[in-house]
Image (cartoon, rainbow, N blue to C red):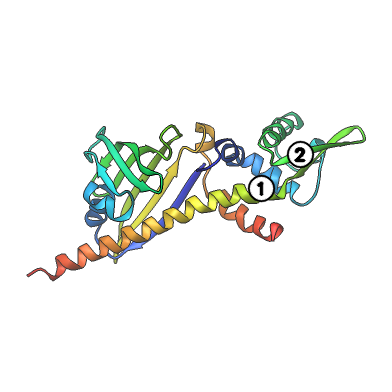
Amino acid sequence: VIDDALWSAIGDPTRRRVLDLLVRGPATPTTLGENLPVSRQAVTKHLKVLTEVGLVTAGTTGRERRYHVDVERLRRATGQVADVATEWDARLHRIKDLAETLHRSREDEP
Amino acid sequence: MTIEREILVAAPPATVYAVVSDPAHLTTWWPDRAEFSPVPGGSGTIEFETADGTVVHRLTVVEAVPPRLFSFRWSDHPDGRDLLVTFEITATATGSRLRLVESGFGDDAVRQDHERGWDVFLPRLAGVLA
């Protein structure tokens, strides 16, 4: 079963952009904002969501908080998404096999 | 959050439609038991045998437009989120293209997002996390 909060946190495209930037190295809301088409306030909001689910953690050095990715937690989250996609791939292949078998058996009928 | 998948099938759309919508066929590719009427608003159950016993999920048909569109809501957990599964079938020169979309992992804003994002994001992460 997928962790709902985690799933929602990474379901948002802007938050994925934030994570994408953070996997390159720790950053502050200001530097993240410079690389994203959203305000610093919006970045802070997204960071709060990501922090709540444990995907990023904040450390204070200097005047601004610096955020970094929890790689293990992110690996788990992305793995869950991949699992759901993989399950559907397996189901679709079974659908394909069944439809093609049904189709062939009908064609074989006199 | 949305999962999107496509597969080519060497069978006409009507056959593919039957496989994704007929409860008798559903049990071949997904649940152990399925009982619902494959018409809009049709409601019923799908059951899975697990190590912990039988797990029953409610399923409600949303759209049923043979042979091109079939969608239903279900919950992947008895008290979990509501998921929307949509099958779109288009005719091709050699049979059909079946497109699956499963959405609803979260709120409506999140539902707008597409797996296209993941197609870019996941491989890139894989490189970083490796």
Question: Residue placed at 27% from the left, 61% from the top?
Answer: A98
Q: Residue A60's x, y, as percent?
A: 87, 35
**Count of labels in the image:** 2
> Badge 2 sits on which subunit?
A
Q: Residue B12's x, y, as percent?
A: 24, 60
Which numbered disc covers residue A74?
A: 1
Residue placed most toward the observer, A32 or B104? B104
Question: Residue placed at 77% from the left, 40% from the top?
Answer: A32
Residue placed most toward the observer, A56 or B4? A56
Label 1 SS: helix
Vertically, is B79 above or below A106? above
Is B16 positioned to the left or the right of A79 in the image?
A: left
The residue identified by callout 2 is A57
Q: Residue B36's x, y, as percent?
A: 24, 39
Residue placed most toward the observer, B43 or B56? B56
Label 2 SS: strand
